[in-house]
Amino acid sequence: MSTHASALGEPLDSIEQLRHADNHAWFHPWEYLAGAGAANRTQVQRAEGIYVYDELGQRLIDGPGGMWCMQVGYGRQEMAEAIAAQALQLPYMNPFALTSATPVRLAAKLAELAPGDLNHVFFTTGGSTAVDTALRFVHFYNNLKGRPQKKHIISRELAYHGSTYLGATVTGKDREHNWFDIHSPFSHFLPAVNPSKRPAGMSVEAFCDARVADLENKIRELGAENVAAFIAEPVQASGGVIVPPDGYLKRCWEICRRFDVLFIADEVVTGFGRLGHWFASEAVFGIQPDLLTCAKGLTSGYLPLGALLVSERLFQEVSGDNAKGASFGHGFTYSGHPVCCAAALQSIEIIEREQLLEHVREVSPYFLERLHALREIPLVADTRGLGLVGVVECTLRQMVEAGVPEAELYAFETELGMRIDQHCHALGLMVRPLTNQCVFSPPLIIDRQQIGEMFDILHQAILRTQRDLERELGLTWR
Ligand SMILES: Cc1ncc(COP(=O)(O)O)c(C=O)c1O
């Protein structure tokens, strides 16, 4: 028994005991190990609507919406009842051998909501396993079609596609710095498509042309006969809410079709209303992917679930006589878990009944207006967003500094998000700091007045951070 946690059988119910046990017993995702044992995380005690309450009872607007997943809001009685009813009726069913009404209904519903002919739904345990399933399917598909060399996958810098080994091989973030072995002979990365970072003097149109050409050039370089798929988040989420230039995705999709390269849309973040539609691929970007991954907002974060949607065409090409006797030897104990599927069906029902897609489309212009208004603050370098997802990026680069060494400026810059988050917390808002950026994807139920409140707080928090830096570094603004 650990000396840190409940060694003496302590019930772990005080804030201090929980903090201590959390620091020492729970190895968290993306744990910052240099600070292990001293993370002192905020303890979220309960949540209601768009708000979470910390260990001191302070109410915070949930800016990141959990982790881009809290669509219908916290504390929904109907969600709890649907989950409880399913758990009582049938908590588990072997998906390899059996079936049951709830997962079947969800599969049919997703096929109905999805664009084009994405009619076949493979349930997974989350987003990473949905991406894994997509990549394994693509390889399986080409092996079965008798072209085993067609395996290469093209992704992009700053893409995030998950934390399983295979998902990590197509993730374009932190590759050099994360100490993992994520080598894959099949993965290739195109430059990031953030138009705000285009070279000085280049138009957005020319930048878009260049990024589209990157894809075609890479396919030609590898040989189309060797390239299996292009995987893309319609809006690159944790890479910094990168909204591609107009027409970029459509043109990439057309190139994929021309070269017989499959297009995998990773809609783990953009699905289920985040951009005002069930899925963004067709409704926002005019593309019909061959494969689509989703998770997160699928259950509004109430329970873990993901899915891979496969087009009719691809499914037919590996089924019946085309299967050559094969099975798709891939799946999870919890594929189509009935309780998770019940949560998803209930969340979808709420989104439909409360017309949350329409609501997002209605409040999004105000959300974006308030987001972009932050640019008037000197510390803010850029703001980007679409639908109900956004990021504010800060920098010290625009500062006229008084002899502050470059390395020190850089160190300050990487902690800007955290500093802003601390001020936000004191003022009643939680944000998701990503080095020098803060990310937003609030629950879809957020109303106009709450959006106003959220950005008022953020504005104030950035100003406070700016004042701290002026004091600490003796800086003035250009
Ligand atoms: C676009 C995208 N794909 C995949 C994933 C992985 O999903 P999960 O964390 O549910 O495994 C994420 C998670 O943030 C994501 O943003």
Image (cartoon, rainbow, N blue to C red):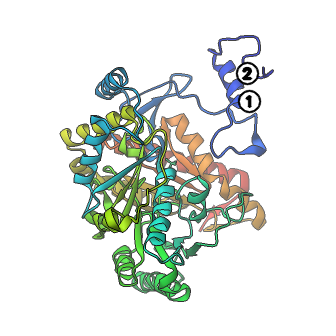
If you read the primary sequence from the N terminus, does the residue marked by circle 2 or circle 1 appear first?
Answer: 2
> In the image, what residue type sits under mark 1?
His
The quarter in which the N terminus is drawn is top right
> In the image, what residue type sits under mark 2?
Ala
| In front of the other: 55 or 323 | 323
Q: Is mark 2 within 8 Å of ligand 1?
A: no
- Residue at the image position 74 percent from the left and 65 percent from the top: 402
| In front of the other: 8 or 121 | 121
Residue at mark 2:
5
Q: Residue 257: where, in percent of width, then height?
A: 35, 79
Q: Residue 6: where, in percent of width, then height?
A: 72, 17
Vertical placement of residue 80 versus 152, above or below: above
Circle 2 residues within 10 Å: few <14, some 14–19, many ≥20: many
Q: Quadrant of residue 186?
A: bottom right
Q: Residue furthest right?
A: 3
Vertical placement of residue 89 versus 291, above or below: above
Residue at mark 1:
24
Q: Quadrant of residue 314?
A: bottom left
Q: Residue 54: where, in percent of width, then height?
A: 53, 27
Q: CA distance from mark 2 to mark 1?
A: 7 Å
- Residue at the image position 56 percent from the left and 70 percent from the top: 157
